[in-house]
Image (spheres, rainbow, N blue to C red):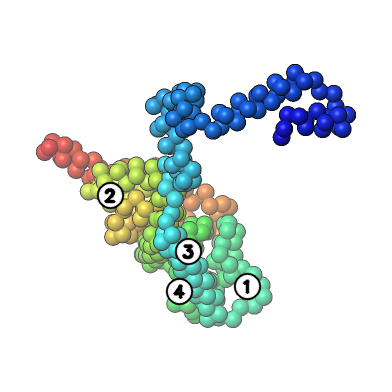
Amino acid sequence: MDFETTPLLAETGGIEVSEKELKCNYNKSLETSSSSTMSPSAQLTTAPQIKELPQHDQPADENASAKMSNPNITASSPKKPMSAAERSATKKSLFILAGIFVMSLAAMFYVYMIFPELNESEKQHMKIPRDIQDAKMLAKVLDRYKDMYYFEVMFGVVVAYIFLQTFAIPGSLFLSILLGFLYRFPIALFLICFCSSLGATLCYSLSNLVGRRLIRHFWPKKISEWSKHVDKHRDSLFNYMLFLRMTPILPNWFINLASPVIGVPLFTFAFGTFCGVAPPSVLAIQAGKTLQKMTSSSDAFSWTSMGILSLCACLSLVPGLLKNKLKKKVE
């Protein structure tokens, strides 16, 4: 734009502009245009000096960029995300578990169908007992048909017992008392030990199939600590299994689910369960002989019986302690 035409435009727009202001603005525009046409070397020399960032800030920027590129990395969470293969395997395991549960329910229904025909008053008591009153009414119904349908009644109680143990459902204590009421002492003791060990072994297998990945994913530190403890006492795991089965320190369902995850061998688990449940089963069988006089399940365990059971549990640890002392002396 020419310098002479500028006043004319200002006058037509109604703007009063002095000549000095126009000359100053015109000179500034010339300076800016000349600076833009300077050579690159001149621009570099006249450009202001940029301070370099300190070197200790660079690692922080690298960590920030790494976190932005991988959002799964967090400073407070040591838990590793499951891979795609692990997620698909876990889903398959859950489907298998659901299928096994449905098949078990079908087996329970089959046992109910092959049972002798009952009247309406008896059918309402054919259920898994939840308290001592349910156990009393079920015992009356089964005792009426036991002599004529001996194996059918036994098979029904055994299947129900294994079902509860396999899926960690409460109620097996009342079935132990019921077996003590229905059968003689040796038969009742063998059935309880067999059902407990078989049901616990099936629960162990299901936990090994499904629970191992989930528990290791959500509680990796605790599992590693327990596994180290198991490795230290691997030679005396059978004695520890006896102790845990005899005492109520840990519930049976927790022992069944946690044992495969922390590395307890299957044979040691099954045989330790078969032998370890025998002393508490003796008390349940004795309570079954007086089932109709009981008012609650706590009547099965007196202070004397609990003292004897605690003594047996402590004695079960003695061989393991002796083995550890001998090892230390040898080392």
Q: What x and y, as percent, mark residue 296?
A: 56, 52
| Quadrant of the image occupied by residue 10 | top right
- Amino acid type of the residue tagged 1 in the rendering: Glu
Marker disc for residue 166: none
Check disc 4 and report the residue beneath it: 155
Q: Secondary structure at mark 1?
A: helix
Residue mark closest to the camera, 4 vs 3: 3
Relative to 14, 38 lies left or right? left
Q: CA distance from mark 3 to mark 2?
A: 32 Å
Residue occupying the point 49% across, 25% down: 47
Check disc 1 and report the residue beneath it: 122
- Amino acid type of the residue tagged 3 in the rendering: Lys
Of the numbered discs 4 and 2, the one sitting upstream in the chain is 4
Of the numbered discs 4 and 3, the one sitting upstream in the chain is 3
Q: Nearer the viewer, residue 77 or 231?
A: 77
Q: Nearer the viewer, residue 83 or 171?
A: 83
Residue mark closest to the camera, 4 vs 2: 2
Q: Is residue 123 above or below residue 305?
A: below
Image quadrant occupied by the C terminus: top left
Q: Secondary structure at mark 3?
A: helix
Q: What x and y, as percent, mark residue 44?
A: 46, 28
Q: Nearer the viewer, residue 99 or 254?
A: 99
One can see residue 30 in this view:
yes
- Amino acid type of the residue tagged 4 in the rendering: Phe
